[in-house]
Each structure stands twice: as C-alpha cells, then as structure tokens.
Image (tube, helix red, strand yellow):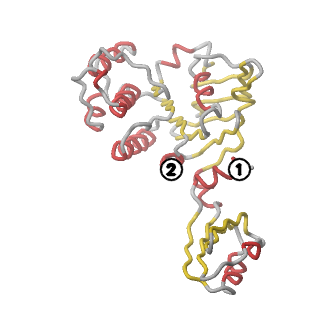
Amino acid sequence: MKILEIQSLTKRYGSVCGVKDISFDIGQGEIFGYLGPNGSGKTTTIRIFLDFIRPSSGRARLFGLDSHVHSSKIKSRIGYVPGEYGIYEEMRGAEYLRFFGALRGCQKPPLRDRLIDIFGLDISKRIKSYSHGTRQKLAVVQAFMHDPELLILDEPTIGLDPLMQQRFYELLLEMKNRGKTVFLSSHILSEVEKVCDRVGILKEGELVAIREISEIKRLRLRSIEITFKQEVNESVFRLDGVRKVERDGNTIQLWVDSNINGILRTISEYPVENMSFRDASLEDIFMEYYSE
C-alpha cells in the first residue's frame, strides 16, 4: 500500500526553482531517507506534503488523498517534527503536550508517558528553561505520542546527544516493525544508513537517485589506503577498476569497484609500510553525487 505518492512535483519562487519534477512513492512500513545539504529542497518538499505551500505543478498524495484538498484529514493521521521548531516558551512541558493532545482530540495520547520516560524529559519545567536538546526531545514526543500512521521528520536529531540519538533510532525501528511509515529528511548520512530502507538524494532541487540501502551496501565502492616507505607517483594506480586516487605524502587512497587482484599486484611492486581496506560509507557515495 502506498502511503505517500509524489508525481512531477515542482515549486518555483520567481526565477528560483526550489524543487524540480520530483517523483517517488513510499510504501507502508517503510523508512525513507531524504538526503541533501541545506538549500537542496528537502524542507520545500515537506511543506508541500503538509499543504503549508502549494506546488507550481505536480501533486502530492498521502494515504491516497490529495495533500491540498484533504489537508485536515491528512494532518490528523501524521506526526511531524519540523526543522525549525517554534515553541510556546511560557508553557510548561506538560501543558504543551496536553495542548497538542487536545488539538488532535486525544486526551490521553497512548505513547506519551512511555516517550517521556524513554527520553528522560522533565515536563514540569517551563519550556523557556529548556536547552536546545531538551526542546528537541519535546518535539519528538509531541510528534510520536498519538501513535500516528505516518511520521514526517525534518532533521529530527539535531541537538540530541548520542545516547538520545540511539534511543530515537530504536524508536524508529520499533515504529517500522509496527507497520508505521517514516519520511526522514536529513543531512546526517550515518543515521540514514542505520535505519532507512531506501534513500532519495537531492541535488539543487532535483532528485538525482533513489537507492535501496541494501543495494548501496552490496554495490558500494571499497577504499584501499596504502602508506608506502617512499613516495610513489599516484599515476601508476590509474587502473581499470579504480574510480578515484588521492595522495597525501607517502599515503595513497584508492576507491575501487573491481580488479582487486590487478590493483594488489601493482601495490606489491613498491615497499609498503601499512595498508587498510574498508567499504565506502553512504557518505562517500553521497559525495560522489555532489563532486564535480
């Protein structure tokens, strides 16, 4: 079942194009990562989902409903963490959560108390006394507490410490296992790699790739870093299967996708001090799309 469908979505601001001809869909129980640096169009896409802004062309459908025509029905079924989180500072945390529960017609949100415990949130204090990280915890609790069918999360872990980030990832995977759907906009590639099933990569408002995480892990490049006992000209490693060569003094780093035996034979012709192998990370792959 498709929970979110985007068809030829374009948003222009005068002569500037926020997003251009974007199309993708997300199925029930999927965690979809939406990747791109600041200004690439991630938040613009989300604001169209939520009917905060209207597209110049194309359309978005959530739960099979038009994002504009059925905006109120859609909002009742989602949880949302915005990238820029406006907050009522004079309220106490408990008042804030009670207010959002009332907006949703939910006097006792089913996950509220458990989430407060998971994130160690003190809801007795006024929000103006909260640190940035505590405010982010409050944002996460209000988005999840009513157990929504779809979570739309825009940079949700900004300000959370590593322990809270790990608890957040565990919560996402729990929601997925319960059939919930997550749209996760982020520029933190390691978190996307931990929890997402697929990723879409944005570049200057255009969706340049959609990949399964499992596919990326299967097809990703490998890095070989070699420190030689003497300086070696990197040009000798411009071989079949070598995608990129970088040199720093006596250390050469190779990004390879095949021909490992031939590359190792070339390495063996020179005195080696140290050598290491690793798989390229999602971040390395992401940078491939952004390099000239």
Query: Given the current orientation, which residue lies at the most extreme left position?
Result: 124
Which comes before the other along the chain, label 1 or label 2? 2
Which image quadrant is residue 51 in? top right
Which image quadrant is residue 127 in? top left
Query: Circle 1 is placed at which residue position?
Result: 291
Q: Residue at x 47, y 22 (%)?
A: 77
**Horizontal side of residue 84 vs 134, given as left or right:** right
Residue type beneath disc 2: Ser
Query: Which quadrant is the N terminus positioned in?
Result: top right
Q: Residue at x 51, y 39 (%)?
A: 29
Tag count: 2
Q: Is residue 229 above or below residue 247?
A: below
Dot 1 crowding, Cα within 10 Å, few <14, some 14–19, many 20+: few
The x, y position of residue 89, in whole percent, is 33, 17
The x, y position of residue 5, in whole percent, is 64, 30
Query: Circle 2 is placed at which residue position?
Result: 190
* Between 64 and 50, the one nearer to me in the picture: 50
Helix, strand or loop at disc 2? helix
**Horizontal side of residue 193 vs 104, given as left or right:** right
Helix, strand or loop at disc 1? loop
Label 1 close to label 2 by CB (< 8 Å): no
Residue type beneath disc 1: Ser
